[in-house]
Image (tube, rainbow, N blue to C red):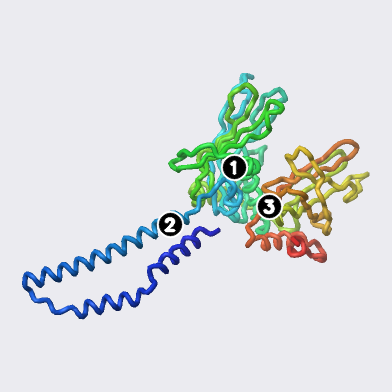
Amino acid sequence: MNSGNQRDNGLRNAYDVFSEDHESQRDELMSRIANEPNVVVTKSVAQHHWYKLNRMIATIAAVLLIMVSSLVLLNSNTSVAYGIETLTQRLLAVRSLHVQGFIVQKVVNSQGERETKKFPVRWYFERPKRLWLQSYGFSDQGDGRATVVQQNHTVIDGDLRVSEDPSSGNRFVVPVDPRTSELMVELMIQSLTFEQLVHGPTDQFSKVRTEYANGVKCDVYEQKLGGLSDGQGTLQRIWLNPRNGLPVRVDIFHLSSGAEPQLALTLSNILANEDAPDNLFPLEHDHALIPREFAGIEAVGFSSAGPARLGTWYALQLSSTKALVCWTQHIMVDDDIRWFTHEPKFSLAGQESNAVLEVENLREFSSNGVRWRWSLISLSGEEQFSGTTIRATVTYDGNSASGEILPLQFPEDRLQEAFDVMQELTLGATGDNVLTLDSLVK
């Protein structure tokens, strides 16, 4: 519900009450004032008129006091207090989000000693086409240790994207297709918000207390993931501002049986709907722009199992139970490409059952020498998409290649626009067999 409209309607209703018979009362009041006899300045008459005037002023003041009190009461009764159940939708509706914090990670230092360090993370996004992301990647040594691989820095500003050369350290600004720029930004935004801010279905959270965070009175929610059946688990804590339904702070802890929770990630400063800091944009680059022709699409994710290859593009959530997925698969046989020889199995990532989902292949097209398919994924029973990732898996000679696809969510008034852009980009050479949103959501 739109809180602004709700507030406006409430004020209109309140004024309607006080405007009833207003004209007749005003006419009567003005008539009485006009018919008052001329004031003769004597002590008794002056006192008489001052008494009537004071009584009139007191009456008007009482009416005004009732109006103000009623409006205050109306406003307090109609204000919306958002809970954790609306968090996903509130995050999808924000214009911008600026998040800062740090990762806690065990690493091996230059002396070969194991130590715990904090690595700062920061990301800012502004819909539809701006993103600034700083994070870290770590490599696992297989013995509980980790070594820092490198700092990751991704920037998209409108139709430009920063590209870094790891070997030289040079940074380039590369033009991107303006039609895919929003898809790229939205994928990173939703991946970050669902993985780091929400981190699971909201119905598993419980409100534990109310306290202040960053000067804001918040409702604090917690959820535990993993169940500690294997001695391990995760605890997430969210400080939620009930006045706008958005997080102010998020902490994630590692849980181990018999040990105190260990902080893994804290996003200690979360600001919504603010302009970008001056030091993030516009982009600065080391070299001139690299010209690029925009034609067709490229895989967003790719994996392999022997000669079998699996690629994914973007996916779009059509409803709570349906998603549209774009993917490709082929094998190499003596330099010969054979398409769609091994159909992938689709399942929900992170689900214990790994049940295979219902798939309907809708159409094929070619782009940049690659053949692609659009498929409709449907959920059954009580399962619903809510920031849920779909896993596609191809098996070849006992080896598996898998990729995860996050169906992008858009507000209802923008779903058709996003659908049309995706179809426009994937029409292929012929442009036939065009899909329509209405036929898919029936």
Identify the residue at the far left of this view.
42
Give the CA distance from mark 1 to mark 2.
Answer: 31 Å
Query: Residue type at mark 3?
Result: Leu
Image quarter of residue 25: bottom left
**Do we see residue 31 in this rendering?**
yes
> What residue sits right under mark 3 in the picture?
408
- Give the image location of residue 326, x and y in percent: 77, 53
Is label 1 or label 2 in front? 2
Q: Earlier in the sequence, mark 1 or mark 3?
A: 1
Instruction: Identify whether 268 is placed above or below 140.
Output: below
Q: Which mark is residue 75?
A: 2
Q: Are marks 1 and 2 in contact (CB under 8 Å)?
A: no
- Give the image location of residue 341, x and y in percent: 90, 48
In the structure shown, which secondary structural element does the residue marked by tag 3 occupy? strand
**Do we see residue 164 in this rendering?**
no
Give the CA distance from mark 1 to mark 3.
Answer: 16 Å
> What residue sits right under mark 1 in the picture?
197
Of 364 and 287, nearer the camera is 364
